[in-house]
Image (cartoon, rainbow, N blue to C red):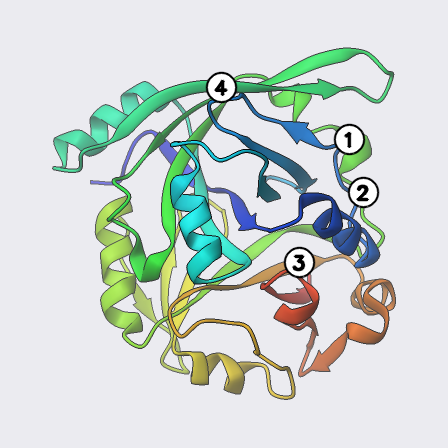
């Protein structure tokens, strides 16, 4: 039975060491970023968002050490920058947490939090969320998962922030590398109640639900064969590796990325070294 309170991938969280430097880097790649957000003192973190439709990318940084952000700090210490977790859209976080508890997973939450937002007209608003998490140890290939209910969507999906010089429109795939892709894909499939499928090159896909982006699990070597000529330096053998992004204009994506852009087959790629530990793959929408 498919989970009733989860609607596919909501956003990808990229953990960065220096939040403002990371934001400047992604602006150079042609993305429009939200103003910097600061979470509560308990969370001790801040972020920038890159708003797409119907999903987004979050650059997350630790501003002060807290118990809540200890896993994120451990990730940075062990792995360095990169895709640390993936959020699903929650219809109802309280019901979603109870739903996975009935399946035997000790859900964390739901937890309410918010961050202040300055709207384009200068007015003050708040982005309010209610999240729940799968147990920290239930992290397929080391990628943590949680679900996010947006209580004030109008303060997050702001039209002025959804137009990008590189033409990016939405997430298509989240690529995860693993020495045992079938095993880790099956793990995720159990967690979110989705069937896996094997692709022609041996990669294993897990639909995230609805029309949202898919997860693709493969070995690091297979990732290199999928995008020849692109350096994978900085990526782990096991973990979140890449975001495949649909763009309205591949030439615009290549131009925006400048001298770090690499054409690989029908895609424009930005190596992990140039995108805070994340391989970016632009494909035609």
Tags 2 and 1 touching, CB below 8 Å: yes
Q: CA distance from mark 3 to mark 4?
A: 30 Å
Above-or-below relation of 209 to 158: below
Give the vertical position of 66 relative to 264 (above or below): above
Q: Nearer the viewer, residue 223 or 15?
A: 15
Q: Residue at x 38, y 21 (%)?
A: 111
Gap between marks 4 and 1, in whole Å?
Answer: 23 Å
Res 159 label = 1
Q: Which residue occupies the foreground of this view, 115 or 6? A: 115
The residue that appears at 51% across and 87% down in the rendered structure is 225
Q: Earlier in the sequence, mark 4 or mark 1?
A: 4
Q: Which mark is residue 246?
A: 3
The numbered dot on residue 113 is: 4
**Mark 1 and mark 3: Cα distance apart in space:** 18 Å
Whole-percent x, y for residue 185 in the image: 29, 63
Does label 2 or label 4 sit earlier along the sequence? 4
Q: How far across and how far down the image is residue 282, in percent?
A: 68, 65
Which disc, if any, is residue 163? 2
């Amino acid at each position: 039975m498919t989970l009733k309170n989860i609607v596919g991938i909501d956003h990808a969280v990229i953990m960065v060491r220096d939040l403002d430097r990371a934001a400047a880097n992604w602006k150079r790649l042609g993305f429009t970023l939200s103003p910097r957000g600061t979470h509560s003192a308990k969370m001790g973190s801040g972020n920038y968002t890159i708003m797409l439709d119907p999903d987004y990318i979050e650059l997350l940084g630790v501003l002060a050490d807290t118990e809540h952000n200890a896993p994120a700090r451990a990730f940075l210490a062990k792995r360095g920058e990169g895709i640390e977790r993936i959020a699903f859209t929650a219809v109802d976080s309280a019901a979603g947490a109870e739903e996975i508890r009935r399946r035997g997973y000790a859900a964390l939450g739901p937890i309410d939090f918010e961050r202040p937002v300055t709207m384009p007209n200068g007015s003050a608003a708040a982005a309010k969320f209610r999240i729940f998490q799968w147990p920290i140890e239930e992290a397929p290939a080391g990628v943590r998962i949680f679900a996010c209910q947006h209580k004030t969507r109008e303060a997050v999906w702001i039209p002025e922030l959804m137009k990008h010089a590189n033409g990016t429109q939405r997430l298509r795939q989240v690529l995860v590398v693993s020495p045992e892709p079938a095993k880790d894909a099956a793990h995720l499939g159990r967690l979110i109640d989705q069937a896996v499928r094997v692709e022609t090159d041996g990669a294993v896909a897990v639909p995230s639900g609805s029309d949202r982006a898919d997860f693709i699990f493969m070995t690091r070597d297979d990732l290199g064969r999928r995008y020849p000529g692109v350096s994978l330096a900085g990526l782990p053998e096991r973990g979140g590796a890449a975001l495949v992004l649909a763009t309205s204009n591949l030439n615009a994506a290549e131009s925006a990325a400048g001298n770090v852009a690499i054409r690989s087959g029908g895609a424009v790629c930005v190596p992990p070294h140039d995108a805070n530990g994340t391989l970016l793959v632009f494909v035609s929408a």
